[in-house]
Image (cartoon, rainbow, N blue to C red):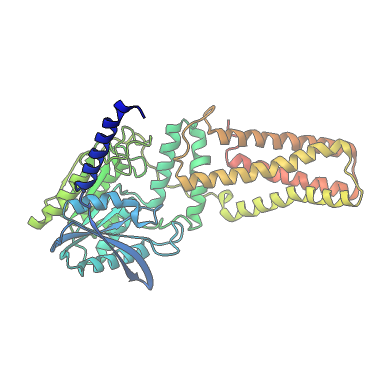
Amino acid sequence: MPPERKPRRLSRLAAALVLTATPSVVSATPAAATETDVTFTSDGNTLHATVLTPPGNPTGRPGVVFLAGAGSTSRWDHRAEAEAFAKAGIVSLVYDKRAGYSRATSTFSDLANDALSGVRLLRGRPEVAPSAVGLWGHSQGGWVAPLAASRSDEVSFVVAVGASGLNTARTQLWSNHTYLKHAGVAPELVGPIGHNLSRMLIAADMFGDTGHDPAATLAKVRQPLLGVFGEHDRSTAPGESLPLFRQALDQGGNKHYTLRVVPDANHNLRRSTDGFTRGSADFAPGYIDVMTSWINDRTDGSPPASADPPPAQDLPSEPVAALAWYESPALHLIAFGLMLVAFLAYPVSAAWHRLRGRRTTPSVRWPVRLLTAVGPIAALGTLAYLFFIVATGATAVTSTVLGRPPIWLALQLAALGVVAAAVATAVRWRRAQLIGRDRRRLGLALAGGVIFLPLAAYWGLYTV
């Protein structure tokens, strides 16, 4: 080590010892809320929950039970709102949905019972004023919260966020149409892609509480209600929903409602300029303030009725059309099953005969193989894609080619391949003059193609 560098090293060592010996001062950020895990029961089900309390040891504070939307099962999906409420002095209860919850089978009545059980839990907490416990519901929760409030005086107020004044079926079909139209899907394909399977599920009672009448429920709500609508909500028809809320509440004689539109907000009330793009993770400006101030101001009395003008809504909703006889879910299930059996019978029997040393006539072999391969792929692919549309609410459709989603275009090309293979099989089957077992096997494959054609036409695979 060169002599001239030793003093510098010693000074560094001394400085390090001084820093080590000096107590460090850390600026700790106070927790947004105190969290307490709890459980409660509803209809014999044990629900797991967390109470978020403002820092310190508050007493006599307002309390809110959170009800999440249809796709949510976790208590933490609205943690950000609950923490914001805690900062504003409001106690929150968030809970996981009951075990076995399903959007298709769980009723709003069950969910309302769960919410009321949560209200009773909060009313018994020392931090909460029993006379100031309300419900906060987003999306599906915006249907359930008024229903629960209409059943119990224990609910002091209701906050409905991103809620719809239309029934579940009409709301979902409007949303599907809105997203498909924005993606550039051709108008003549919106029905086959975005509506028909949903209509069948509705008819089969597999689409949630389609019989729920939100207007009739709102007319029974006597508690103060705050409705919060995102300007760019593309899931719940806000331009129609706000007036429907106002009309129903007026009809029921409710004089203490507040209906507010939050600018530049999507369905989740996050900042968004159009409601379609993912947008910011931040809340839209004013969203939290309008809720916390309204809840806290209730300690000074119930607010008089007031409502913002409804936001613009380019696409009006339409009533859900009843199914025609040829749209019967049972009929389509039977036809689909027969078609698959007919298509798959050929390769199964071909493999069996190959093991026994028998072969199909070469001139017929390739078209029937194409028919029985492409047919099931097109059929199953179509069914899978349509269920994907139902599951995602068409939100995953973001681009189109020639007015159709790329996957749908591929399915249409496959459907054309089925037609070509069926025609080629029929022509060569006739020319080959097959008899006996070979004739029956190819005839069965052709029957699958015959069943495929009207099904494919109905589902829009041949729509230009």
Question: 303 or 435, which is in the foreground?
Answer: 303
Return the residue found at the far left.
300
Q: Is residue 310 visible?
A: no
Q: Measured from the top left, where is residue 273 in percent x and y?
A: 31, 32
Left or right: 124 as drawn, with respect to 50: left
Q: Quadrant of residue 127?
A: bottom left
Left or right: 151 as drawn, with respect to 428: left
Q: Measured from the top left, where is residue 100 in percent x and y?
A: 45, 63
Q: Which residue is depicted at the point 27% across and 30% down? A: 8
Q: Is residue 367 visible?
A: yes
Question: 240 or 139, which is in the foreground?
Answer: 139
- In the rendered view of the protein, which quadrant contains the N terminus? top left
Return the residue found at the far front.
3
Left or right: 358 as drawn, with respect to 185: right
Q: Which residue is depicted at the point 11% across and 52% down? A: 297
Question: 23 or 94, which is in the foreground?
Answer: 23
User: Up-down: is 49 above or below 433?
Assistant: below
User: Up-down: is 176 above or below 305?
Assistant: above
Q: Measured from the top left, where is residue 328 in percent x and y?
A: 56, 53
Q: Which residue is depicted at the point 88% across and 43% down? A: 360
